[in-house]
Amino acid sequence: MTLYGLGASAGVGIGRIVCVREEPLDYTGAVYAGAQAEKQRLQQAAVQFCAQTQAMAARVREQAGESEAAILDGQVEMLNDPVLRAQIDEAIDAGAVAEAAVDSVCTMYAGVFDGLDDELMRQRAADVRDLCARLLGLLLGRASVDLGALPAGTVLAARELTPSMTVGLDSAHVAAIVTETGGPASHAAILARALELPAVLSVPGLMDAVQDGMAAAVDGGEGEVALAPDEAAEAAYRAKRAAWLREKDALKAYRAGPTLDADGRQVKLYANIGRPDEAAAAAAAGAEGVGLLRTEFLFMDRLCAPGEDEQCAAYCRAAQAFGAREVIVRTLDAGGDKPVDYLHMPKEENPFLGHRAIRYCLDEPALFKTQLRALLRAAARHPGIRIMLPMVTCLDEVRAARALLKACAQELDAEGVPHAADVPLGVMIETPSAALIADLLAREADFFSIGTNDLTQYVMAADRGNAQVQRLYTPLQPGVLRCIRGVIEAGRAARIPVGMCGEAAADPRMIPLLLHFGLDEFSVNAASIPATRRAIAQWDGAKAAQAAEAALRCATADEVARALDALCAQRP
């Protein structure tokens, strides 16, 4: 039997299933002992929770890195949030036992996250549920799941792999991870990629289909889970695994060094990161800088906006891993698929075309200036920091943002606060309007970065999350390719650098086109850095020109794909 799910971490793993089945946390027998006694029980459990979680975070930091540890650190911050604790206390005052109060409040928050459109935010619901389960376990005196003694060759199967389950996980004994829930931003996906373990998530009916000791082969690239494969199927998976291991070994040579094409022309290879704690891992993977630091992480998963000092510290943490090298920070891109409840953004009929990103920030100058002041202060300590504006559609937005930035610098001057005098201000090109007036924007922007994910969506009028129009959503569409070429040409004419931070920057079929068009900087997910560096090294100017000319002659995306696939197949 073969099950299918979401391929969340590439590779092939073969072994035997070990099921993680959690016992239900039944508190129906708990007796209310009065508000004071219940609150005291809760406080004792909370102190234990924080101590255990901080110790877990320290172990995970050594094992998998800062990104994983940050998930656990976030649980401590969440539990200590005064609003959440006040809501639990209110439930206790109303007569609920501590277990019921914790369960009801956490369930409410998990439901809020589950209802959001943004995939990253939906995955935060799993962190809330993990917090809830562990706190209930402490209140009930139950032991948590321990995955520290798995046998070699384990294919770990769980309904949901939570942060606390994986503390002490011996990755040398795990062949693959499969879960019934979770997406690409889930804890299981982040962990699997950090440990370079094959993983398939969101497998329907997984836990009903598997049992301990069952043989399994997992293909994390294809999203396949073969249960009890026959001899021929197992041999085929072993061959695929051997090929994957050879590929991993070959890529080790591309984890460091300059990024050069076959003619020796150098380009920049940066990383896209979602949190400051990911910067060190990106640098270790070979990133030469950060092409996109999303700042939404600072504003989400909380009940009020972060202050200037907190933001400054976060931007400094991200920049620290790269010394004086560039770290491009995108200002708040709230709205669309990234709502922030406490900002009270009104519900819109079409939020992707609504009051979001730079539009919202310019209309909320106090919020925006706090971020700009924090960035100016951080840039005084880390001169590689750059500021990038999202969702720009007209020159007025750039001028207004620059005026606010200047006003912030003047305020800091008057207050005697150290700050950078002149931080480069760039524009993210992700709307058709910005692409069409790239020549005008280039006169007043210090750099461009092409966001192909949204640019493709808007150029093709195709929602990237809608499966019915998925065939239209590809940067290989002739209209999108022409937009990209025009933006790069406008940047080069104005002598400003042009980067790309959308997923197209890591697409091996797009790389020769981008090289020929003259892209200066490729910014990709950290895991894609070695493969992207190798792909760039395989193209010289003449071959890249041939690929670009062939693609631009094509009339459809399918024709472009076939032409580029054929040319890429000829590369070494």
Image (spheres, rainbow, N blue to C red):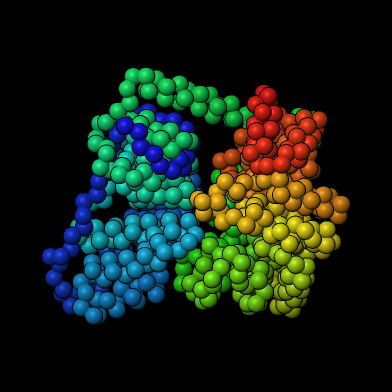
* 441 relative position to 207: left or right: right
Count of marks placed on residues = 0
Q: Quadrant of residue 513?
A: top right
* Residue 565 visible, this angle: yes
- Image check: 300 left or right of 108? right
Residue at the front extreme, as displayed: 555
The percent coordinates of residue 280 (x first, y second) are 57, 47
Q: Nearer the viewer, residue 346 or 465?
A: 465
Find residue 538 and report its image quarter. Answer: top right
Task: Indicate the position of residue 69 as horizontal and vertical percent values.
Answer: 45, 51
Q: Is residue 256 visible?
A: no
Please tell me which residue is depicted at 45% across the width and 40% down the height of the picture.
Answer: 7
Q: Does residue 66 sit above or below 124 in this rendering? A: above
219 vs 97, left or right, is right
Give the quadrant of the C terminus.
top right
**Front-lying residue, 443 or 417:** 443
Residue that appears at 74% across and 31% down:
539
Quadrant including the N terminus: top left
Quadrant location of residue 551?
Answer: top right
In the rendered image, the vertical position of residue 263 relative to residue 417, given as above or below:
above
Q: Residue at x 68, y 24 (%)?
A: 570
Position in image of residue 407 (x %, y %)? 74, 76
Query: Which residue is drawn at the image coordinates 21% and 55% (left, top)?
Result: 24
Query: How far across and how far down the image is residue 210, in percent?
Result: 27, 37
